Image (tube, rainbow, N blue to C red):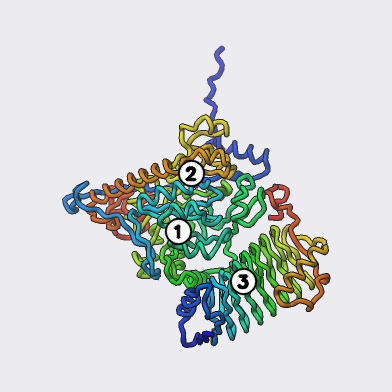
């Protein structure tokens, strides 16, 4: 009669659709997946923290009336010309080569309107970004593509890049598709071939050498410029301590959610720490060496709004840096381009094949037709708007916590929603006095 | 002719004075005494002057040099003439690791031996080593000429791009994608030119050199080459 009832078809939680599709893709192609952007997996993040706000014991400041300052000085330790930013949000290093010249110009315009800095990337400094960035940080990377003492001298700060959050311990690869004549010339390589960016610096090994390298950079620039050291979050306590020992003015700490132009998916998703778990150890190193607020800490990796920025500052950072969010602000992954994303076999919000150089938004490309779609002035305005909103949001929270400067936010203003976030951020689980891993209430 | 004694004058003062020079300066020949292995001596020069250093220097001597001539009467530490743009750097003794690293132009001459990673990531510089070079020399070398009158160590030219390597003696081993190539007349002429610029014209016969360069098999990623990477 009736057939035996059947259970509904059940898919494996372990072998989920994404894992299965990746196995099939690997089996068909024989090469690992390369993509742009940062970790997409869910990791403990700033969403898992909440501010407490003022109460009987804490006195708030009046919104729109009482001053809540947002400026930040970077490079006060050794540099004769430290940098003064109006907002504690900077634009992270992104290369010309990976990004179009129009995108670099837009970032410069938007950041400069808001009184903050932009950063070069692997591939050297372009006239577009120098011309449109009031404050420009020049990266010294392992590849040294385009490295030039004249650019070193006309930069406002120098960032020695040890690693980045998306791939701590990894170099880069700019695939042949994105190597235009101009990119090839800047990097002194033939057009159309894959360009590997080394994972180690060519002329120093270890922290003792790094200290001497930094001395050289200071001598070349007559001790004028702040020198940053950028590390991917992996061993933040020791890396921060060694960066301080090596003579850094500023430490830049990038979590695994931080984007990259292109690397292996397996690297992005499986190497490094989420930024939430990296800030407190870095701050601890600064405090243990008596250098907190003397050597500044910039954190990045998944910063999306003023609340994220405020939480990072409350945990002890001096500033935050944005990359992915800045690209979204100027038009990356815009649903208005859905038709184009569909043609590329993806959808707005998921597009990450930046290395292929076919970005319909004209940002992650060297194609002249595509990049001409991006209006640098309009895109710059959008970035400035977004930075203004982030700053207002951070100020709103700081005032609610009774702070006259966003730097006065502190861990005591925070609680965590999850045990994991409480342990990583070293703040109590909401409604308790429990900080996992700590013996007493901090 | 300014004569600077580094046992008296701080390095920072010396470099600042050298950086302030204009192309029209009359102070065209500087002599530095007692370098005592100090780091970053004469780094970041930007004018066509000559700086003579009597003694051995530490790391990054003449780093990022542009236009200037830097003569080291002694040995040099790590990264001598690193990222040099133009000009001439001459080390009469030996050089440590990463000599001429990432150099984009100019000429580096080393009379003794150079240690490992000589010419690493070189981007247009010409390097002449009268002695031998250590392992991993010309790693990821992009362009320029490395001329070695002696021998080369392990993994010469690993992952090399378009740089040309000329070795007169033996090569212990070649790195990934680096192969021996024909030494044609144009290459003999290139070696002759570099040797002449380095002041070594007539000391050795360019036809005694073997040429090494990229097989160009790793220029675009191919999974069947995965074992080579």
Q: Helix or strand or loop: what does disc 1 sit on? A: strand
Q: Position of residue B36 (x, y in %)?
A: 54, 85
Judging depth in this view, the residue of B221 and A65 nearest the camera is A65
Frontmost of labels 3 and 1 is: 3
Judging depth in this view, the residue of A183 and A210 nearest the camera is A183
Please name the residue that numbered disc 3 is placed on.
B87
Q: Position of residue B195 (x, y in %)?
A: 74, 73
Q: Position of residue B227 (x, y in %)?
A: 71, 53
User: For the residue carrying disc 1, how many other residues have a C-alpha within 10 Å: few (<14), some (14-19), or many (20+)?
Assistant: many
Please name the residue that numbered disc 1 is placed on.
A137
Q: Residue at x 72, y 51 (%)?
A: B225
Q: Within the image, what quadrant is residue A236 found in?
A: bottom left
Q: Residue at x 48, y 45 (%)?
A: A103
Residue A411 in view, yes or no: no
Q: CA distance from mark 1 to mark 2?
A: 30 Å
Frontmost of labels 1 and 2 is: 1
Identify the residue at the far left of this view: A56
């Amino acid at each position: 009669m009736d057939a035996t009832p059947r259970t509904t078809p059940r898919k494996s939680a372990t072998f989920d659709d994404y894992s299965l599709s990746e196995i099939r893709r690997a089996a068909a192609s024989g090469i690992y997946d390369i993509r742009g952007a940062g970790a997409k997996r869910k990791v403990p993040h700033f969403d898992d923290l909440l501010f407490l706000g003022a109460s009987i014991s804490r006195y708030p400041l009046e919104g729109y009336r009482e001053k809540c300052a947002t400026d930040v000085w970077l490079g006060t330790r050794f540099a004769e010309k430290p940098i003064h930013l109006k907002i504690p949000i900077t634009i992270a290093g992104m290369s010309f080569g990976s990004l179009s010249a129009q995108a670099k110009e837009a970032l410069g315009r938007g950041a400069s309107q808001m009184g903050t800095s932009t950063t070069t990337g692997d591939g050297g400094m372009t006239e577009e970004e120098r011309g449109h960035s009031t404050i420009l940080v020049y990266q010294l990377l392992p590849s040294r593509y385009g490295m030039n003492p004249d650019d070193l001298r006309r930069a406002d700060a120098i960032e020695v890049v040890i690693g980045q959050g998306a791939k701590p311990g990894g170099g880069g690869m700019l695939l042949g598709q994105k190597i235009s004549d101009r990119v090839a010339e800047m990097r002194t390589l033939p057009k159309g071939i894959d360009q590997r960016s080394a994972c180690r610096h060519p002329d120093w090994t270890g922290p003792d050498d790094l200290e001497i390298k930094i001395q050289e950079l200071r001598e070349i620039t007559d001790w004028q410029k702040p020198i940053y050291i950028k590390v991917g979050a992996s061993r933040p306590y020791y890396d921060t301590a060694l960066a301080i020992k090596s003579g850094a003015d500023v430490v830049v700490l990038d979590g695994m959610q931080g984007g990259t132009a292109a690397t292996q998916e397996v690297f992005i998703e499986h190497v490094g720490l989420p930024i939430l778990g990296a800030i407190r150890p870095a701050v601890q190193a600064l405090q243990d060496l008596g250098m907190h607020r003397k050597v500044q800490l910039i954190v990045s990796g998944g910063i999306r709004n003023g609340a994220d920025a405020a939480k990072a500052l409350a945990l002890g950072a001096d500033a935050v840096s944005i990359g992915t969010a800045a690209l979204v602000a100027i038009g990356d992954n815009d649903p208005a381009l859905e038709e184009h994303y569909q043609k590329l076999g993806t959808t707005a919000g998921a597009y990450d094949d930046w290395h292929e150089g076919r970005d319909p938004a004209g940002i992650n490309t060297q194609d002249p037709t595509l990049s001409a779609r991006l209006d640098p002035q309009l895109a710059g305005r959008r970035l400035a708007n977004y930075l203004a909103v982030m700053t207002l949001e951070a100020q709103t929270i700081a005032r609610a916590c009774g702070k006259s400067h966003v730097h006065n936010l502190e861990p005591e203003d925070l609680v965590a929603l999850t045990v994991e976030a409480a342990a990583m951020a070293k703040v109590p689980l909401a409604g308790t006095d429990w900080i996992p891993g700590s013996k007493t209430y901090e | 002719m300014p004569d600077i004694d580094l046992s008296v004058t701080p390095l920072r003062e010396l470099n600042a004075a050298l950086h302030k020079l204009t192309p029209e300066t009359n102070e065209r020949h500087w002599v530095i005494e007692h370098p005592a292995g100090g780091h970053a001596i004469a780094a970041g020069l930007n004018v066509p002057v000559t700086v003579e250093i009597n003694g051995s220097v530490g790391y990054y001597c003449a780093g990022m040099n542009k236009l200037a001539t830097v003569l080291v009467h002694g040995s040099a530490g790590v990264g001598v003439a690193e990222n040099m743009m133009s000009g001439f750097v001459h080390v009469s003794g030996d050089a440590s690791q990463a000599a001429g690293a990432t150099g984009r132009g100019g000429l580096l001459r080393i009379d003794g031996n150079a240690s490992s990673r000589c010419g690493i990531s070189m981007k247009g510089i010409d390097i002449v080593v009268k002695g031998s070079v250590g392992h991993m020399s010309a790693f990821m070398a992009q362009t320029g000429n490395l001329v070695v009158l002696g021998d080369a160590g392990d993994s010469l030219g690993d992952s090399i791009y378009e740089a040309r390597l000329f070795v007169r003696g033996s090569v212990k081993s070649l790195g990934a994608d680096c192969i021996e190539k024909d030494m044609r007349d144009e290459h003999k002429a290139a070696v002759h030119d570099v040797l002449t610029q380095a002041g070594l014209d007539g000391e050795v016969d360019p036809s005694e050199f073997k040429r090494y360069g990229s097989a160009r098999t790793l220029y675009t990623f191919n999974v069947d080459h995965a074992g080579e990477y």
